Image (cartoon, rainbow, N blue to C red):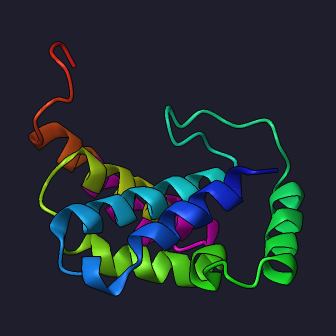
Amino acid sequence: KKGLKAFSDLYDKLNQPMLESDPTVLKAKIQVLADLHLFVNGISPLDTSQLGFQSKDVSEEVEDMLYNQPNCDVNILSNSLRVTMLTDMYQHLDICYLKAKAAYALGLNALECQFHQDAERIFFESIYILDVCEPLALGM
């Protein structure tokens, strides 16, 4: 039950006023938000496979953090606020693997909210980005 705490602590370190204008920090924030969104929804941020836990386990951990850790960032623990922040930051990214991953996370959210047309558009954008961006490694 330390996954959410690790994401929260990392985001808190990146969310400092003096770091706001740094484009590398923006990318790191997007990475944390996209990975957290996948993790909370039971999907591995590394390979998008299903993780072996129930969503109620994550809900219990969120409640525990909100009540027992007053310094945690509520915005990243709330699905709607996290998606709003990710959507806002997503628009500032150039075409890269991280943008495709963020689009995938946003597409999953749209699908979960039954916004099928939005989900289809966002998933297509994710695939398009993967198709046009430089591969992460040779042969990929």
- The residue at 53%/59% (across/down) is 108
Residue 79 at x, y percent in the picture: 62, 76
Residue 114 at x, y percent in the picture: 60, 72
- Residue 9, by quadrant, is bottom right
| Front one among 106 and 117 | 106
Q: Indicate whether 64 appears above or below 107.
A: below
Q: Indicate whether 37 appears above or below 136.
A: below
Residue 29 at x, y percent in the picture: 38, 66
Can residue 25 be seen?
yes
Q: Which residues are magenta?
A: 108-126
- The residue at 52%/43% (across/down) is 45
Farthest residue, direction top: 139
Which quadrant holds the C terminus? top left
Instruction: Report the side of 42 relative to 115 (left or right).
Output: right
- The residue at 27%/45% (across/down) is 127
Q: In the image, is residue 111 part of the stretch drawn in magenta?
A: yes
Residue 18 at x, y percent in the picture: 27, 83
Instruction: Report the side of 61 relative to 122 (left or right).
Output: right
Q: Indicate whether 100 appears above or below 58.
A: above
| Front one among 66 and 86 | 66
Q: Main secondary structure of the magenta part?
A: helix
Can residue 40 be seen?
no
- The residue at 82%/50% (across/down) is 1
